[in-house]
Amino acid sequence: MVRFFFKAIIFISLSAASFVARAQSGWTAKGNLTHMQATTSGKMIVNGEFKENPSDCKNSKAFYIDYDIDGANHIFQLLLKAIASDKPVKLYVTGKCELNGQSEISSASISAK
């Protein structure tokens, strides 16, 4: 009986933890990028000011994209143009949160002012 109770507590704890770690996917509102950082850890980090972010990740202003995904270089170029020209962008967040609370992105869209 004690083993069953112990297993039930572990199952409930892990289920609750996985529920908390989930985030929503979707497009952010238009916003301006404030910082881009290329890293040697396999990902690019982007910071920006967005009024709406469907992600429930801990840091609502920080995003990342893995270098290894298809199209990452194109997204990097688009974001670089956006920050250089101070044009607003929309980011598609996947719903995956990184350990530091950053939202993973898989797409980006640049807008005319």
Image: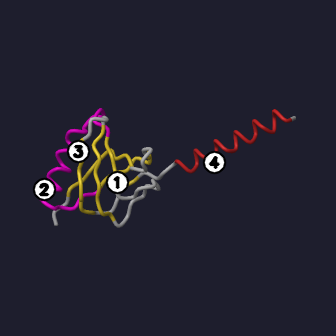
Count numbered badges in the picture.
Answer: 4
Q: Earlier in the sequence, mark 2 or mark 1?
A: 1
Q: Which amino acid does label 3 sit on?
A: Ile
Q: Which of marks 2 and 4 is nearer the N terminus?
A: 4
Q: In which quarter of the image is the N terminus?
A: top right
Tag 3's secondary structure? helix
Q: Could you tell me if the residues under marks 2 and 4 are in contact, i.e. CB atoms within 8 Å?
A: no
Q: In 3D space, how far apart are the residues under numbered discs 4 and 1 (Cα atoms)?
A: 25 Å
Q: Which of marks 4 and 1 is nearer the N terminus?
A: 4
Q: Which colour scheme is used?
A: secondary structure
Q: Nearer the viewer, residue 41 or 92?
A: 41
- Callout 3 environment at 10 Å: few (<14), some (14 to 19), or many (20+)? some
The residue carrying mark 2 is 84
Q: Which amino acid does label 2 sit on?
A: Ala
Tag 4's secondary structure? helix
Residue 16: give its label. Answer: 4
The boundaries of the magenta stretch are 66-90
Q: In 3D space, how far apart are the residues under numbered discs 4 and 3 (Cα atoms)?
A: 34 Å
Residue 62: give its label. Answer: 1
Q: In 3D space, how far apart are the residues under numbered discs 3 and 2 (Cα atoms)?
A: 14 Å
Left or right of residue 64: residue 82: left
- Callout 2 environment at 10 Å: few (<14), some (14 to 19), or many (20+)? few
The residue carrying mark 3 is 75
Left or right of residue 49: residue 88: left
Give the x, y percent position of residue 20.
56, 51
Q: Which amino acid does label 4 sit on?
A: Ala
